[in-house]
Amino acid sequence: DYSAIALRKARRKALALGRQIEGLIMDARQLDFPSASFDHVLCIHFMDYVAEKDIVTGEILRVLRNEGQFAITYPSDSEGVALGLDLLKDGIHDKVSSGKGRLRAFAESLAELLAGILYFPLLLRRKNSCSHKELVALFSELTRGPFQIEEYSAYHDFIVSGRKTNEEGKANAD
């Protein structure tokens, strides 16, 4: 992470669960790991806050071993208020499906919405979103391995997953 405060919070949460974790402060644009260090990389909701997605994605793939697997989420163009409304609609639908009446489901969802009003500015903020076409171009340039792009409708994100390879079958050079 880039924040010592976030790492302290994560460490406290882990300790409360009886687990020990190590957190590292570093810049995702220049990861302090040797090339080909990891078999798997999972990066969820991080690219929402990154301007240089191409550089960070390149770093993620650099530290991934040849034939290593990755899954990375990227914000799509369809976020903002539409995302909030979709989440509210899904929440009401789930409550009604669980046997609660529509009025009760709506009232509970409204109470949750009011409790979560602090998150409203997050829905309105401008994100550096990606298009499907941009992600195809980025991953076609960075890896020769197979990858797929899915749109995750609940959070309006793209999920790019696959396996890193290059034409020579060796780990990509720095």
Image (cartoon, rainbow, N blue to C red):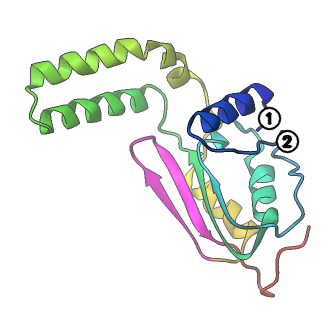
**Residue with the mark numbered 1:** 2
Would residue 90 appear left or right of 60 to someone viewing this image? left
Q: Main secondary structure of the magenta part?
A: strand
| 60 up-or-down from 162: above or below | above
Give the quadrant of the N terminus: top right
Label 2 residue SS: loop
Query: Range of the magenta residues?
Result: 146-163
Asked if the residue under mark 1 is in contact with the one under mark 2, i.e. CB atoms within 8 Å, the reply is yes
| 167 up-or-down from 107: above or below | below
Q: Residue lying farthest bottom? A: 168
- Which of marks 1 and 2 precedes in the sequence? 1
Residue 89: name its quadrant. Answer: top left
Q: Is residue 47 magenta?
A: no
Q: Amino acid at mark 1?
A: Tyr
Give the quadrant of the C terminus: bottom right
Tell me, for residue 27, which label it has, or none.
2
Q: Is residue 160 magenta?
A: yes
| 139 up-or-down from 106: above or below | below
In the foreground, 122 or 107: 107
Which residue occupies 35% across, 17% down? Answer: 113
Q: Residue lying farthest front? A: 18
Between marks 2 and 1, how big is the CA–CA gap?
6 Å
Q: Amino acid at mark 2?
A: Asp
Which residue occupies 67% across, 28% down? Answer: 9
Label 1 residue SS: loop
